[in-house]
Amino acid sequence: MRLCQIADIRTGLVVARKKATSSPAKKYKMLTLKSFEDYGYINMNELEEFESTEKLSPQYITQIGDVIMRLSYPYTAVYIDKSNKGILIPSLFNVIRLQDEKTIKGEFLALYLNSDHMKKLISRYSIGSAISIIKTSFIKDIKIENIPLDKQEKLVQINKLHLKEVTLLTDLIKEKETLYKGMFSTIIK
């Protein structure tokens, strides 16, 4: 099945049209390219603040169950859960809202879009040389394999464990770096 058959897909907001020059009506946290981590999660420390001329349509704000996808390399997809809902989605991203989760779960869709197989396919259809991007029409035409929900759930759980392990190892590396720098400073003094 094609992705457009099971989801509504649209580009985020062109924020330049809604940027307040004085006395904003509403402030939002906004996704940035830096806020998307390669492993498929949002770095909340890299969000920007956006001051809008008006209250924006909910279609441009992350909702639980959304899959947000970068339109530029590395084309990372992120599943939106309760920890990252309510964030403004600029036009650098596509919003994929599943019509229901009877055929595919949102978390699995993000994992599927981040797979090596999909990254290679997306790279072949990207356009531009300095900054390669993909069109929303391409994303709508992506074919999704019909995988049973129980297998989707197992893959999602395995991925969660993998991300937890990566996070722990990254934290360990940072701690060791601090330790080694401290030892080096102590020896020099």
Image (cartoon, rainbow, N blue to C red):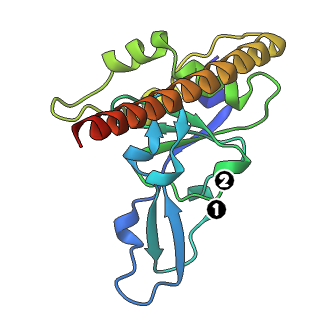
Residue 92 in the image, given as x and y percentages of width and height: 39, 47
Of marks 2 and 1, which one's residue comes earlier in the chain? Answer: 1
Viewer-nearest residue: 110 or 94: 110
Pointer 2: what residue?
A: 85
Q: Name which quarter of the figure residue 16 lies in.
A: bottom left
Instruction: Say left or right for 84 vs 124.
Output: right
According to the image, label 1 marks what residue? 58
How crowded pointer 2 is (Cα within 10 Å; few <14, some 14-19, many 20+) is rated as some
| SS state under label 2 | loop
Tag 1: amino acid: Pro
Asked whether 157 or 130 is in front, the reply is 157
Question: Residue 96: x percent and y percent?
Answer: 59, 39
Towards the viewer: 180 or 71? 180
Identify the image quadrant of residue 146. top right
| Mark 1 crowdedness (10 Å alpha carbons): few <14, some 14-19, many ≥20 | few
Which image quadrant: the N terminus?
A: top right
How far is mark 2 from mark 1, CA to CA? 11 Å
Q: Locate the C terminus and report the quarter of the image it occupies.
A: top left
Amino acid type of the residue tagged 2 in the rendering: Lys
Mark carried by residue 92: none
What SS does tag 1 mark? helix
| Front-lying residue, 11 or 90 | 90
Quadrant for residue 100, please give it.
Answer: top right
Q: Residue at x 56, y 16 (%)?
A: 143
Name which residue lies at 61% across and 21% down. 165
Up the image or down, 179 lies above or below 28; here it is: above
Extreme-left residue of the structure: 130
Residue 50 x, y percent position in the rendering? 44, 69
Name which residue lies at 56% across and 36% down. 78
Instruction: Give coordinates of residue 125: x percent, y percent.
Output: 33, 20
